[in-house]
Image (spheres, rainbow, N blue to C red):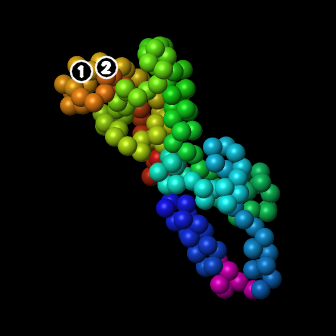
């Protein structure tokens, strides 16, 4: 559904841009297409449409002069899509680098299925992968592991065995749409 919405939005914006352009500018602009990356791999629009909305953690559109300069004047922008699986791997590796206890617990359990992530006091129920993957050294403050007893008493969560309490600052550019939080 999300990929359909993105495609429709792209087509609609193109139509609006071309509607009042001289014919020669229309022909020039039709050759320019956004460059699409999924999980750091360049793909075409056909490949992008294979993904369902429930697989996507974050979408970022770059149209700034620096990005366009990198890719030349042959594109209208760059779309970077990150899947939930890719985001999960990123934040797990990041947290392992920040906490030896997290790394050891994760390795002993082989996965994070029994973890309840809690970001700045908010229990993350679903679609949280993009939020956790947005945490970096600029905003990360701490990671604390709590056991099931404390998780149940403080957060009323009985379905998971461990709580992973992550404290961070709020990204400066949160409201500019650059980070998910």
User: Is 102 within the magenta?
Assistant: no
Quadrant of res 41:
top right
Q: What element carries label 1?
A: helix
Quadrant of res 146:
top left
Q: Which residue is drawn at 51% across and 21% down?
A: 96
Dots 2 and 1: beta carbons under 8 Å? yes
From the viewer's perspective, is 177 left or right of 158?
A: right
Quadrant of res 45:
bottom right
**Mark 1 Cα shell of 10 Å, populated few (<14), some (14-19), many (≥20):** some
Tell me if residue 147 comes above or below residue 83 in the rendering: above
**Mark 2 Cα shell of 10 Å, populated few (<14), some (14-19), many (≥20):** some
Q: Quadrant of the C terminus?
A: top left
Q: Can residue 171 be seen in this view?
A: no
Tell me where residue 35 appears, x and y as whole percent: 71, 57
Q: Which mark is residue 98?
A: none
Residue 155 versus residue 25: which sits nearer the camera? 155
Tell me if residue 86 comes above or below residue 7 in the rendering: above
Tell me where residue 64 appears, x and y as whole percent: 66, 56
Residue 110 versus residue 127: which sits nearer the camera? 110
Tell me where residue 148 appears, x and y as whole percent: 27, 21
Q: Which residue is drawn at 52% across and 54% down?
A: 52
Q: Which residue is drawn at 67% across and 50% down?
A: 37
Residue denoted by label 2: 146
From the viewer's perspective, is 71 left or right of 134?
A: right
Q: Residue 150 carries which label?
A: 1
User: Is 18 within the magenta?
Assistant: yes
Q: Is mark 2 on a helix, strand or loop?
A: strand
Residue range of the region highlighted in magenta in the rendering: 17-22
């Amino acid at each position: 559904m999300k990929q359909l919405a993105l495609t429709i939005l792209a087509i609609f914006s193109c139509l609006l841009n071309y509607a009042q352009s001289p014919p020669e500018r229309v022909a020039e602009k039709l050759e320019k297409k956004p460059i699409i990356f999924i999980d750091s791999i360049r793909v075409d629009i056909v490949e992008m449409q294979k993904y369902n909305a429930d697989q996507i953690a974050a979408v970022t559109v770059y149209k700034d002069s620096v990005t366009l300069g990198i890719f030349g004047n042959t594109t209208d922008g760059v779309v970077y899509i990150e899947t939930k699986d890719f985001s999960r791997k990123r934040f797990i590796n990041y947290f392992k680098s920040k906490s030896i206890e997290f790394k050891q617990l994760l390795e002993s359990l082989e996965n994070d299925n029994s973890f309840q992530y809690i970001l700045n006091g908010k229990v993350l129920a679903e679609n949280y992968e993009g939020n956790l993957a947005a945490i970096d050294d600029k905003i990360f403050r701490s990671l604390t592991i709590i056991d099931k007893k404390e998780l149940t008493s403080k957060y009323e969560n009985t379905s998971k065995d461990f709580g992973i309490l992550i404290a961070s600052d709020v990204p400066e550019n949160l409201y500019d749409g650059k980070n998910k939080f």
